[in-house]
Amino acid sequence: MKKIILSFLTLALVAGVGTLATLAYFNDTETSTGNTFTAGAIDLKVDSEGHYNGLVCRDGLWQDCQDTAGTTDMIVNGSFEMPEVTDDSAKWQIFSSIPGWTIAWESTQTSYDGRTRPEAALQEYHEGVNGWSTPYGNQYAELDSDWFGPYDPLNNEPALVKLSQSITTTVGKKYLLSWAFSPRPGTNAANNILKIRINGVETQVSADGTAGLSWQTYTREFTAKTTSTTIEFAGGGVADSLGVFLDNVQLFAYETACTLSQEFTDSCASTWELKDLDPTQDKFFNFSDIKPGDWGENTISLHVTNNPAYACVNFINMHDDDFNGTEPERNLLEGNDKTEGPDQGEMAENVDVLLWHDDGDNIYEEGETLLTNGVEPASTVFTSSYELFNPSTGAMEPMMAKYLGLAWCAGTMTIKPDYSLSCDGTTMGNEAQTDSLSVDVSLFVEQARHNGQFSCKRPVVTENTLN
C-alpha cells in the first residue's frame, strides 16, 4: 500500500512541475462557437385564375377582359443609337460596351488565321455602310461582328456575338417583344440565323440576303415566370464576320381592360393571389348551372419556397351524384335499370378534361407537355394522380413559378390542328340533367434532395379534403 501511495504522489509532483513549464511555450487557440444544424423547409403556395366561356374571374365577378400592349418601351437602347459611329470613312465601328446591353461572344473559336480573339466581346455597329438603310434611327447592329475593326487585314473570323438585357417583370403578366431583322446583302440564309432567347427558351428566324437588304419586323409574346426576365439576341449560322442585322428591339407589357359580363352575373371565386389554400373555401371550379357546350379553364400557379421539390397533383374523392332527376332524364334512361342516388350520375362521363404544363398564358399551345393522355373524360382524370416534377423531368426551383393548365368542356373537347381547343355540347344529352360532379384537388410537394426514388403518394381519402 505504501508503494502505491508513493507512486501517486510522485506522479502528482511531476504533473505539477510540467504545468509550470508550459507557461513558457508558444501557443495558439482557434475556436468555432455555435455550430448548429437547422432543419430546412418546404412550403407550397398556390394562385389561380379561373375562366368560363371566354370570361375571366376578376374581383369576384365574371368579366370580359382584353389585353392590349402598353406604350412604355422597357428596352434600353433598342435601336442601337448609342454609342454613335464616328468613323465617317468606314461607316462602321466595333464597341466593347454599349448602353443597356451586355455583350458576349456566341462563337466558341478563339483563334483564327494565326490571330487570337480579343477577350472582351465586341459589337459591330453600322451607319450607312454601302448605303444600306435602317428601319429606325440611323444605326443598327450586326451580330456576326469583327475582332479588330475596319482597318485590320483579318477577314472572315468567327465573331458571332450575343446581346442581352435583364428586365424587371411581373410574374404572370404578359409581354410583347418585337424586333427588326434583315440578312446581310450578298450572303445566304446560312449566314443569317438570329436566335431569340427569353430566359433561355430559344426560337430562331433566318433569311436569305442574296437578293439584298430585307428588313422584317417580328414579334413574340410571353408570360413572365420570374421577377427578372433575360432577353437575349444571338447571331447564328456560319461564323465569318458577315451577317445577322438587328434593329429596333422593343418590349411592352400588356395592359388588361375588363368589362362585367351581362350574361353571366353570378359571383365567382376561382381566382386568387398566391397563398396557402383554405380547403373549405378555395375552389378551382364551382358552377351550379352547367349547360352542354359550356367550357372553362384554370391556370394554376405553383410556387415552392426554400428548397427544390418534386410535385404531384392528386384528384381524389370524386362524386358523381344523381338526385332529383327530371322527366327528360327519366324518359331517356327508362328501361336501363337506372338508379338515382350518390355516385349514380352521368356527369363525369360527359365532361371532357385536358391537363398540361402551361407557360402561364392560359392557352394550350404547341410544344406544351400534356399530363393527360390527350383529352380524357372527367371520370378518368378525376380519379388519377399526375407527376408534375420528378427525378426525370427535374425539380421545381424555389420561387420559380410553374403553371398547370386544366381545361374542361361539357360535351366533347377537341384539340384542333392549330392546338386551339373546341367544345361541342351536342354530345351531352339529357342523361346528365341535374347531376352533380365534385372532386378534391390535392397538390403535393416533396424535397428533391436525396430523393431519387420519388413517386406520387395519393392522400388518404377523406371527405372534403380539398376542392
Image (cartoon, rainbow, N blue to C red):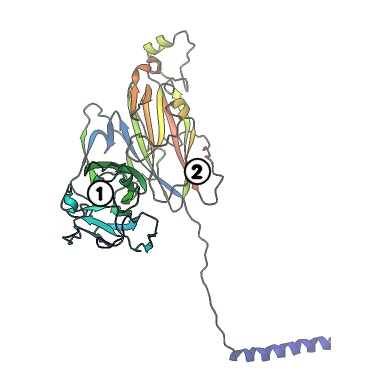
Amino acid type of the residue tagged 2 in the rendering: Asn
Q: Is residue 293 magenta?
A: no
Question: Secondary structure of the magenta portion, mostly?
Answer: loop
The percent position of residue 463, horizontal first and vertical second, equals 48, 33
Q: Is residue 151 magenta?
A: yes
The percent position of residue 269, horizontal first and vertical second, equals 32, 36
Q: Quadrant of residue 8?
A: bottom right
Looking at the picture, tell me which residue is in the foreground, 41 or 111.
111
Question: Mark 2 sits on what residue?
Answer: 390
Q: Quick check: 233 above or below 31?
A: above
Q: Is residue 448 left or right of residue 280?
A: right
- Find the magenta span and give its range: 148-155
Q: Quick check: 209 above or below 6?
A: above
Q: Quick check: 87 above or below 378?
A: below
Amino acid type of the residue tagged 1 in the rendering: Phe
Regarding residue 405, the answer to whether it shows in the image is yes
The circle drawn on residue 245 is 1
The circle drawn on residue 310 is none
Q: Circle 1: is it few (<14), some (14-19), or many (20+) Cα within 10 Å?
A: many
Q: Is residue 312 left or right of residue 239?
A: right
Give me the residue at 17% from left, 60% from top.
89
Looking at the picture, tell me which residue is in the foreground, 389 or 437.
389
